[in-house]
Image (spheres, rainbow, N blue to C red):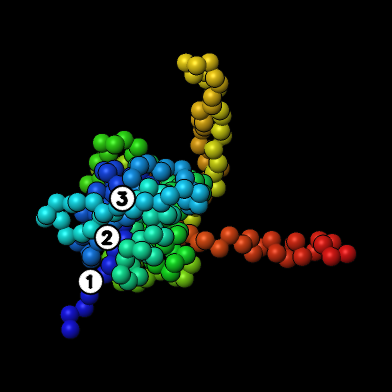
Amino acid sequence: MEDKKPLILVTNDDGITAPGIRTLIKIMNKLGDVVVVAPDSPQSGMGHAITLNDNLYCDPLNVEETANHLEYSCSGTPADCVKIAKQEILKRKPDLCVSGINHGSNASINVIYSGTMSAAVEAGLEGIPAIGFSLLDYSLTADFSPCEDFVERIARNVLEHKLPPGVVLNVNIPKLKREEIKGIKVCRQAKAHWREEFDKRTNPQGRDYYWLTGTFINEDEGEDTDEWALANNYISLVPIQFDLTAHKAINTINNWNLND
């Protein structure tokens, strides 16, 4: 009997019509049977939010007759998309979940806020090998073609080798021509933060409002980090985990007088 093709779930946080996810769908169609469940509108910066106090809609979309995949538009967050895909839409557990390709960086501390990566983490929580892809270009006219073969290569390797339990991949791609990309570097998350400010403004009705701005500060000079890799023309690949336990701190806190 012929082996089944891998089942691949595709999602994102920029919305189902974003150019990045259209590129990702095209690539994944080379690798298996694709089902797309993605937000009906942009959900950037949503982190791991889920819908609890509102109706959640998930509607099938009409795709071109030549398309060999299914698409669903979801009113919820990226994490919602993965949850409803697994519980209500897919007939079996996916062999892979890919999220993106995000318009903009999710390297370093950005991973904490990322809807793209939260979708991948949600898949990982369900035991599905998962990858989040991001391109360091926020433009809606971003050119994703230079990174297509790298995205395909990483996905093929995950399908072949799987991932360690509790691990998903955070992949960031520099904004470069294909010949300028030196390769893929497996690395760690750089220590960095945002120096944030709120720009106070007044709307036409006279009510004050705030617009979040900030400057990204990289505190890490290590040459094994994602920020170093990206600055030096490499694609960064960071294995991340969703066990947030600070294991090194357990012994220290056990020495406190907590039970006296």
Q: Residue at x 80, y 64 (%)?
A: 255
Q: Residue at x 61, y 62 (%)?
A: 245
Q: Earlier in the sequence, mark 3 or mark 1?
A: 1
Q: Residue at x 21, y 54 (%)?
A: 26
Q: Earlier in the sequence, mark 2 or mark 1?
A: 1
- Residue lying at the far left in this picture: please name it: 66
Q: Which one is closest to the eye, mark 3 or mark 1?
A: 3
For label 2, the residue is 35
Q: Left or right: 60 with respect to 116? A: left
In this rendered view, identify the residue nearer to me: 77 or 246. Answer: 77
Element type where label 3 sits in the image: strand
The disc at residue 221 is none
Q: Left or right: 156 with respect to 52? A: left
The disc at residue 5 is 1
Element type where label 2 sits in the image: strand
Total numbered circles? 3
Q: Where's the C terminus, which quadrant? A: bottom right
For label 3, the residue is 73
Q: Position of residue 158 (x, y in %)?
A: 34, 66
In this rendered view, identify the residue nearer to me: 69 or 256. Answer: 69
Q: Where's the N terminus, which quadrant? A: bottom left
For the residues marked 2 and 1, what is the alpha-carbon distance in whole angstroms? 13 Å
For the residues marked 3 and 1, what is the alpha-carbon distance in whole angstroms? 24 Å
What residue type is disc 2 on? Val
